Amino acid sequence: MARIAVIGAGAGAMAAAARLSVAGHRVTVYERSRTYGGSLGRYARDGFVFDTGPGLLHLPAVYRDLFVKTGKESLEQCLTLTQVDPASRHLFADGTGVSLPNASRAGVVRALDRALGEGAGARWGEFLDRAGAAWNRSRRPLLEEPLPEDPRMLSRDPYPAVRRRRLLRAARQARTSAEVGAWELEDPRLAALLDGYALSYGLDPRHAPAAAALLPYMEETFGSWYVAGGMRALADAVYERCLARRVEFVFGAEVVRVSEKDGRAAGIELADGGSVEADHVVLGAQPAPGLLPVREEGPSGAPHRGPVPGRFLVLLSLRGTREAGAVHRTVVHTGDPGAELEAVFGGRAAELPTVTVLRPDDPATRPDEEHEAVSLMATVPPHGPVDWEDAALRERFADAVIGRAEEAVPGLRDRILHAEVRTPAETAADTGAEGGSVPAPALAGAGGAYLHAGSRTPLHGLYRAGGWSHPGGGMAHAGMSGALVAGLVVEGDGFRGSQ
């Protein structure tokens, strides 16, 4: 039985902890804050309850596998999952809108044809076919296996872009997500749909490889799921599973350094001066300067193209009943995508942001049927390039976000009882992520520039889990990272992922 110290209590770290404890190891989690869950936070006031992180779950099979492998009770025995249908409604700058059914390729094609004109659905369906080919080519090495020491196999883009013939000049293929939208989808509204997926994950479609097509493919193929009570309930369930497997938690314990002895990880040092010996250390958080005793080389995530974006939230407590037929998730697309991208990835607040409106039909989120809890989200630069502690800026941007959301919920302003604003500054304080940045999922292509640091590290006995490591950010990806770390610790460097 090995002693294992886990740094951080985010979803990926807890997934690793539960799996390692089941394998017979003594696991202790050290968390700098006073609670678990990482980005899966919760804000509550006067009977209204809001998620402060992701609002929907994609690829729930990742957590079903975690619960199958760590206990008798399945995921669905521990919480309630419901498919959101329609999966999303999209409002475009020209006034058109479309509701996309959940996990139905044929239904999406029909909806796009009805809303955007004959042929739009076929173009999107053909695009998803190519995205599916990219998924099949890259799924195992990108998501289910440890990142190889030589990641060049993932440096080539798996997306089979259409070759465009040009008069008297060589044919060209789309290399970026934005080029896929412009060259293959043709309709600017379909291009906005694709760009919106990339932006929601904190990716710049102008530079993200064409393999970003995997993001809409995953959502539209495997569906979008709502966790009753909010996504924080998933964190609660994983935490309870850890406790049931005898994982120990120490909260308010900031780890300042991983100790080294004889060329391997030997434990951790705490901010209060204490130290803990361990046979293995799992780093489940973004490493602060000085935390690691060795310098890591190779993929390190998205910092290669400027600041990594965060999320701006406006949590609205509303008077009035949620109307029948209200859509759970609506995306209000910007009318000036170029200006928004220049702002978000240039370190400025956008004048006309894309806004996602979440309206869960869940009695647990509101005091009674005469009220409603609504969350608004926009992708923004992190704290640092933008001073998100500036009260005037916070108020001005929140007002812009609410104004955009009124396109999805007419009369929204008149119903507001209370508005809670949360910016990357709050995310940084809550999670410790630099600037409140939110890591994006790993992508193949672009020479490996969109990969993250591997589960293994140069220091023997030190592993990495969570969104800042392979295979990147997002709830499903974080859960996968925990499975990879557990496999490496239990089976050694010969572990090649689940079969």
Image: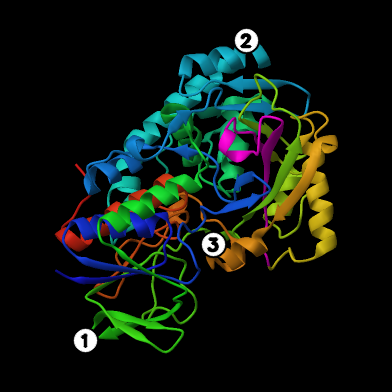
Q: In the rendered image, which residue does mark 3 sit on?
A: 304
- Give the magenta-colored segment's residue range: 356-383
Question: Image quadrant of residue 74?
Answer: top left
Which element type, helix, strand or loop, lies under badge 3? Answer: helix
Real-space CA distance between mark 3 and mark 1, rounded to the nearest whole angstrom: 33 Å
Cβ atoms at labels 1 and 2 below 8 Å apart: no
- Can you say which quadrant of the picture contains the N terminus? bottom left
- The residue wearing badge 2 is 118
Estimate the x, y position of residue 106 in percent, counting from the top left.
48, 14
Answer left or right for 341 relative to 410.
left
226 lies left or right of 186: left
Residue at disc 2, secondary structure: loop
Front tag of 1 and 2: 1
Residue to which mark 1 is pinned: 262
Membership of 372 in magenta stretch: yes
The type of residue carrying mark 3 is: His
Residue type highlighted by circle 2: Glu
Q: Residue furthest bottom?
A: 273
